[in-house]
Image (cartoon, rainbow, N blue to C red):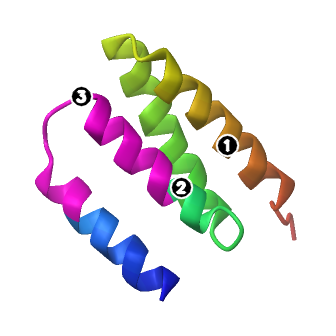
């Protein structure tokens, strides 16, 4: 069920090319769904969300990207 949601959001992200708050929110939503199982994907999405948030001055999006990145790091497993 969760993978279906992630796939749907990734599809929306791929079709939403505009650099705006909606894109930031999609990136953060995907990261928040995958951070426990795929820390690398979560890190990639939160990094993109943070950079775009800086570019468009979207403080709420930046804060959420930092928060989700922190959550994903708590699940990071170094082998």
Q: Residue 16 at x, y = what percent?
A: 15, 48
Image spot of residue 6 (x, y percent)? 41, 72
Q: Which residues are magenta?
A: 12-30
The disc, 3 or 1, on the residue closer to the chain's N-terminal end is: 3
Magenta-span inclusion, residue 35: no
**Image mark for residue 69:** 1
Residue at 53% from the left image edge and 60% from the top image edge: 41
Q: Residue furthest bottom?
A: 1
Rate crowding at label 2 as few (under 14), some (14 to 19) or many (20 or more) other CA atoms within 10 Å.
many
Q: Comparing marks 3 and 1, which lies closer to the viewer?
A: 3
What's the CA distance linking mark 2 and mark 3? 17 Å
The residue lying toward the viewer, choosing from 73 and 64, is: 64
User: How far is disc 3 from disc 1 in space, using C-alphas?
Assistant: 20 Å
- Residue 49 badge: none
The local secondary structure at tag 2 comes to helix
Q: Secondary structure at mark 3?
A: loop
Q: Is residue 14 magenta?
A: yes
Give residue 26's position: percent from left, percent from top.
Answer: 36, 49
Q: Which residue is mark 3?
A: 20
Look at the magenta stretch and give its main secondary structure: helix
Secondary structure of the residue carrying tag 1 is helix
Q: Are marks 2 and 1 in contact (CB under 8 Å)?
A: yes
Give the answer, above or below, for where 24 lies relative to 75.
Answer: above
Q: Residue at (48%, 89%) from the top-left corner?
A: 1
Provide the residue designation for mark 2.
Answer: 31
Residue at x 48%, y 28% (from the top left corner): 61
Q: Residue at x 69, y 37 (%)?
A: 67
Report, in whole angstroms, how far the alpha carbon at label 2 lies from the one at label 1: 8 Å
Left or right: 1, with 75 as reference point: left
């Amino acid at each position: 069920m969760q993978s279906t949601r992630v796939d749907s959001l990734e599809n929306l992200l791929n079709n939403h090319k505009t650099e705006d708050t909606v894109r930031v929110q999609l990136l953060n939503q995907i990261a928040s769904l995958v951070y426990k199982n795929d820390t690398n994907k979560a890190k990639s999405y939160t990094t993109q969300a943070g950079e775009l948030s800086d570019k468009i001055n979207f403080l709420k999006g930046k804060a959420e990207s930092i928060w989700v990145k922190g959550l994903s790091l708590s699940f990071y497993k170094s082998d």
